[in-house]
Amino acid sequence: MKGKSLKEIQDGIRQGEQTVLEIVDYYLENIEASAALNIYVEVFAEEAKAQAKVLDQKVQAGEQLGSLFGAVISIKDVICYQGHKVTAASKILDGFTSQFTATALQRLLDQDVIVIGRTNCDEFAMGSSNENSVYGVTKNGVDPSRIAGGSSGGAAVSVQQDTCLVSLGTDTGGSVRQPAAFNGVIGMKPSYGRISRYGVIAYGSSFDQIGVIGHVLEDVGQFIHSMSGRDEMDGTSSSTTVLQEVAPASSYKFAYIDEVMNHPKMDQSIREASQELLKNLTSQGNSVNEVTFPLLKYLVPAYYVLTTAEASSNLGRYDGIRYGHRSEKADSIDNVYQQTRNEGFGKEVKRRIMLGTFVLSSGYYDAYYTKAQKVRRLVTEAIDSILSENDCLILPTSMNVAWQIGSMDHDPVAVYLSDIFTVIANLTGIPALSIPLGKDESGNPFGMQVMSKSYTEAQLIELGKVVQNTLTH
Ligand code: GLN
């Protein structure tokens, strides 16, 4: 197949060097070759080929094509696509078929995107390793003895293994950026409200956003752009103007938090690469400013109090009556609810429903839920203040590389704590990008995040280019 970026792929098609069908076949071969990694829960092979043929005929006939023609994507198993199954990697949605298509996906389909399949993820997007899936773990594309990351693990590996051009994931607390970093690809979460959540299975509604994983910044930006904008079906979607491009500035102001860069638990190779990047950004004429952020230790607790609270409410609808799986054992209505939920949800989801129900209970509401909301506001104020003085905040995506599969099973809290650097963007609603930063001595990739003010995605893509150029020079 010709071309790494969408533009190159489209040029190749227009010049008759390749057909859309050849591209689809190329990806299907890669899907087969990487089957052992457990990336896809379903591949839409015949449908994708049929759609490719229709597009090829349009090319032949010189007909008008959508702006994303030639792009083949995978979607995380939490995004509704009419007439296709969707399960959130949970037994409780076994057998459920989407009744409609998510607005964001529809906007891509309208531009001639082809969906090649749905990818594995943590159950209801809860996790950081893709180990909490009814389909089993997705393996890391670089080292299959390690986790892919999560919750959009399948999405990241689907790009890393070249089984599609870009992949749609969701990011509630880092689920697009962290697996992207662990597999050496780009991941971006837009501002909260930028992309409609209609048709995306909810985890934490005030945090969730669709994000994009890809190889090339321009493609990631273009996909975010194509999905963006107000949707009447999602009251939280924003009508703020979407800019696809902004003029690059000659230099930028980068902020960093010393406590983050020198975190005692940070892998040595990540620390070194981050320091090196700061130095090089400075020597290239950017201003790199240390800022204080005393709320670091409250991020993960506030995030998990609020998201489990929202999850416990969102998951109330899975009762065995309306969707998917229903227990065979139940002999009374109460039993239908109880048994169905007991059989249908996995361990991590149950843990979070219990945690969320607890923090929302009348006796503890103020102590946990209200307190966490106050922390969220303080974090937002602190980050807004940093970003009023600087163009962006940079910090590593994670303080470690992908861990060995199974090695963290005994310590769910340690896994929660590993989300510390990504949840900032979801607590505050700002857009965030993860760019491959380097590899440790064993070749395991890690990433650097860039975060900018809400609704400045186009500028964030420019900032990403500056970081990329600094890394390659
Ligand atoms: N690891 C985080 C969690 O488990 C983030 C998940 C996500 O972004 N969907 O909540």
Image: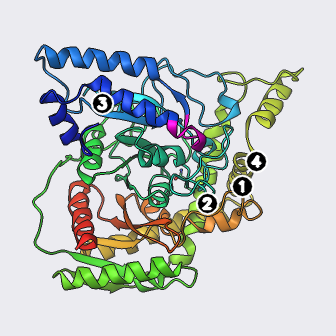
Residue 281 appears at what percent x and percent y?
24, 79
Residue with the mark numbered 3? 107
- Magenta stretch bounds: 33-40
- Residue ID for mark 1: 355
Residue where numbered disc 4 is placed: 347
Which one is closest to the eye, mark 1 or mark 3? Answer: 3
* Mark 2 CB near ligand 1 (8 Å cut): yes
Is residue 35 magenta-colored? yes
- The vertical placement of 446 against 292, above or below, is above
Q: How far apart are labels 2 and 3 at the CA level?
A: 32 Å
Image quadrant where one finds the C terminus: bottom left
Q: Position of residue 178 (x, y in %)?
A: 49, 59
| Cα distance in 3D space between marks 4 and 3 | 35 Å
Q: Residues within 10 Å of mark 2 (few under 14, many from 20)?
A: many
Q: Residues within 10 Å of mark 3 (few under 14, many from 20)?
A: some
Q: Are marks 4 and 1 in contact (CB under 8 Å)?
A: no
Amino acid type, mark 3: Arg
Q: Amino acid at mark 4?
A: Lys
Nearer-the-camera pick, 322 or 214: 214
Which label's residue is closer to the chain start, 4 or 3? 3
* Disc 4 crowd, CA 10 A, few/some/many (<14, 14-19, 20+): few
Q: Is residue 334 above or below residue 266?
A: above
Q: Earlier in the sequence, mark 2 or mark 3?
A: 3
Q: Which residue is mark 2?
A: 304
Q: Residue at x 45, y 44 (%)?
A: 169
Using the rendered view, name the quadrant where residue 36 is placed. top right
In-front residue for pair 156/431: 156
- Residue in view at x 61 percent, y 49 percent: 130
Give left or right: position of 194 versus 329.
left
Q: CA distance from mark 1 to mark 2?
A: 9 Å
Q: Residue at x 24, y 25 (%)?
A: 19
